[in-house]
Image: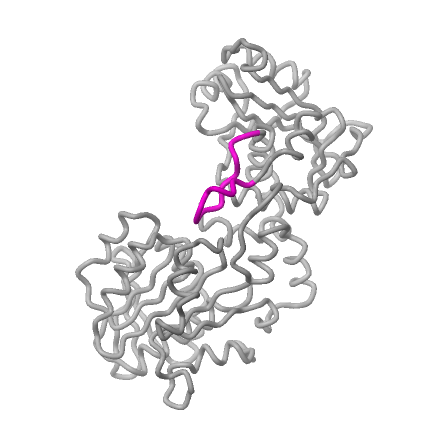
């Protein structure tokens, strides 16, 4: 059992109670920093409210996927409910949870709102309330359909999310209009989570940069702008280490008309160094190379070293197959752009990866890789000067992050949303 809640968490737990000044609100919105304790207290409050106010009714628990609902919400809230005397029965194949206390029982359905087609999943059900976790990651059509199903008298809406850009529809329609919509809006910070130590909070503050720092640490709905890796400069570039690496990996962003970028990574001690590269721009050279020619360039880059794996863009199907036939150990890269950027930024800032002086094309791209400010509601990077950048984040997301458990890996549940 949690020993103590912060004042803001206690406000979430009691906002619907008869003695609370906010009891007349129709909705609650909890947004702000990562790891700020908003999901746990919101989920616990939602279940307590549902069981105190209703019997024999239906409710919805919504996330990006049903798996994320179980992972982010149920895994932490159900044990607390058990300690309070609640009993539950989960019908996993039907995405259904029955919750009981004494002679009272209510039904909670799990829904995933991953795309526009998800709205059809929730049509037809009558609800007394809905909780939407990570609501900023769901399409508007799904969220509006979920709210429209709440037709039982006294129904309330419960929202949690981390901030996105200021043009995001949820920010405009719900947070900016919270008074008009009779919603209670609470902005959370890491300090609102009493279970976090100062050391842990400092680690999270170091992990983000630029717009992502303002969003996930300061809790602001702010636009991405300027250079993606705005902290990177040539002062971070190092010479190739002396001696022999313990491990070798090659990462690849494959292009036919667009440039192809290959990076040779060696692990020296606890750090990965990008010691050498091959970069070919077919437009500039006015000649495209074949898959076989790129495979030859890759072999030359390897230089007879024992290559543990070649990490390749998963869309390069023909090149992947050729490498397999030639005996290379190939791994399809994890290719979520935003989570890969966050992981790469942290790896660079923490010194887990190092770019070496021979990698001039990668260094050039670091100085030109920018956010697309015309992308509207969504964070996107410009599709320019991004080939070494893509190849480097493939390597980090596929090789470095899974090895870093307590380091980079602490992002896994959060960026993945996702994956």
User: Is the C terminus in the top left, top right, bottom left or bottom right quadrant?
Assistant: top left
Q: Percent from the top left, x then y, of residue 323?
A: 51, 18
Magenta run includes residue 295: no
Q: Percent from the top left, x then y, of residue 380?
A: 49, 41
Q: Percent from the top left, x then y, of residue 321?
A: 45, 19
The majority secondary structure of the magenta stretch comes to loop
Image quarter of residue 278: top right
- Answer left or right for 351 relative to 61: right
Q: Residue at x 29, y 48 (%)?
A: 116
Q: Nearer the viewer, residue 39 or 375?
A: 375
Q: Is residue 62 above or below residue 181?
A: above
Q: Residue furthest left?
A: 124
Q: Nearer the viewer, residue 43 or 1?
A: 43
Q: Residue at x 33, y 76 (%)?
A: 26
Q: Nearer the viewer, residue 56 or 18?
A: 18
Image quarter of residue 192: bottom right
Residue extent of the magenta highlight: 371-384
């Amino acid at each position: 059992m949690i020993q103590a809640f912060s004042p803001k968490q206690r406000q979430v737990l009691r906002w619907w109670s008869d003695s609370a000044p906010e009891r007349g609100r129709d909705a609650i919105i909890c947004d702000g920093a990562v790891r700020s304790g908003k999901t746990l207290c919101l989920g616990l409050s939602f279940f307590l409210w549902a069981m105190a106010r209703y019997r024999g009714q239906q409710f919805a628990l919504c996330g990006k996927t049903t798996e994320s609902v179980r992972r982010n919400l149920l895994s932490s809230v159900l044990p607390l409910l058990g300690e309070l005397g609640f009993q539950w029965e989960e019908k996993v194949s039907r995405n259904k949870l029955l919750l009981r206390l004494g002679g009272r029982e209510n039904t909670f359905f799990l829904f995933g709102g991953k795309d526009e087609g998800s709205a059809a999943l929730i049509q037809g059900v009558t609800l007394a309330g809905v909780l939407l976790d990570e609501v900023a990651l769901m399409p508007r059509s799904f969220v509006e359909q979920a709210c429209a199903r709440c037709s039982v008298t006294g129904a309330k809406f419960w929202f949690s999310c981390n901030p996105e850009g200021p043009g995001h529809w949820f920010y405009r329609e719900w947070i900016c209009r919270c008074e008009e919509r009779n919603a209670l809006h609470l902005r959370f910070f890491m300090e609102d989570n009493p279970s976090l130590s100062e050391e842990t909070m400092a680690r999270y503050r170091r992990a983000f940069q630029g717009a992502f720092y303002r969003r996930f640490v300061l809790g602001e709905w702010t636009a991405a702008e300027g250079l993606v890796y705005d902290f990177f400069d040539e002062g971070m570039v190092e010479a190739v280490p002396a001696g022999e690496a313990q491990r070798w990996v090659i990462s690849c962003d494959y292009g036919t008309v667009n440039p192809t970028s290959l990076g040779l990574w060696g692990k020296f001690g606890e750090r990965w160094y990008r010691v050498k590269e091959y970069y070919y721009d077919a437009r500039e050279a006015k000649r495209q190379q074949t898959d076989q020619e790129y495979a030859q360039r890759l072999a030359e880059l390897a230089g007879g070293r024992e290559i543990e794996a070649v990490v390749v863009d998963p869309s390069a199907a023909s090149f992947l197959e050729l490498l397999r036939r030639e005996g290379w150990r190939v791994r399809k890269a994890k290719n979520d752009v935003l989570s890969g950027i966050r992981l790469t930024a942290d790896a660079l800032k923490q010194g887990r990866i190092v770019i070496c002086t021979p990698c001039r094309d990668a260094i050039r791209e670091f100085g030109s890789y920018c956010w697309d400010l015309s992308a509207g509601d969504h964070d996107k990077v410009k599709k320019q000067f991004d080939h070494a950048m893509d190849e480097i984040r493939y390597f980090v997301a596929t090789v470095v992050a899974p090895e870093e458990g307590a380091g980079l890996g602490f992002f896994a549940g959060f960026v993945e949303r996702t994956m």
